[in-house]
Image: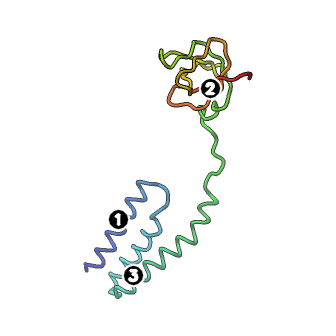
Amino acid sequence: MNIWMLVWTVILVIAVIIETMTLQLVTIWFAAGALVAVIMSGLGCSVLSQTIVFTLVSAVLLFATRPLLKKLQVKNILPTNTDAEIGRFAVVTETISNADDTGRVRIGGVNWRARTEQDHSVCKVGETVRVERISGTTAYVVKTENA
């Protein structure tokens, strides 16, 4: 095994490892180019021709398959349950006080721990609030004038 065959094999292995770790199809084209270069090196081709073929194979595969893969990607990502709650109105079921570390709201029939986005704002039981964001099991809300 000559040194260039080893170099191309290392590039191939690194590209495959990166590809398996990311699963984003970022290095698969370079792995294919490196595989062709390994074969060329084994056949005794010059380093210049190996490098040119590596570059060409990688580039052709990248530009030929990338647009196809983008079309196949899922474009309509459905929101998760928590994403769907953002922007909804909720009713305070336990007084929300960030200072006292208390508060619960009911969003669509589900009881959530709640905090206000404003640090000193207190929301009383029965008030209507709007969900701004959800972090873990806590809904961060803001007071509303009317729902």
Q: Earlier in the sequence, mark 3 or mark 1?
A: 1
Which residue is denoted by mark 1 in the rendering? 13
Q: CA distance from mark 3 to mark 1?
A: 17 Å
Q: Quadrant of residue 13?
A: bottom left
- Nearer to us of marks 3 and 2 is 2
SS for dot 3 = helix
Work out which residue is located at the far right of the displayed protein and give it. 146
Label 1: how many residues lie within 10 Å, few (<14), some (14-19) or many (20+)?
A: some
Residue type indicated by callout 1: Val
- Amino acid type, label 3: Thr
Q: Is residue 20 above or below residue 11?
A: above
Determine the residue positioned at 37% across, 68% down: 12
Mark 3 surroundings within 10 Å by alpha-carbon count, few (fewer than 14), some (14 through 19), many (20 or more): some
Give the position of the N terminus as an image quadrant: bottom left
- For the residues carrying marks 2 and 1, which lies nearer the camera in this image? 2
Q: Residue at the location (43% across, 59% down)?
A: 19
User: Which residue appears at 63% of the width and 18% of the height?
Assistant: 106
Mark 3–mark 2 distance (CA, rounded to whole Å): 60 Å
Inspect the image, locate mark 2, and give the three-letter code of the amino acid beneath it. Answer: Val
Q: What is the number of the mark on residue 23?
A: none
- Mark 2 = which residue? 142
Q: Quadrant of residue 42?
A: bottom left
Where is mark 3, residue-wise?
Answer: 51
Q: Say which element carries label 1.
A: helix
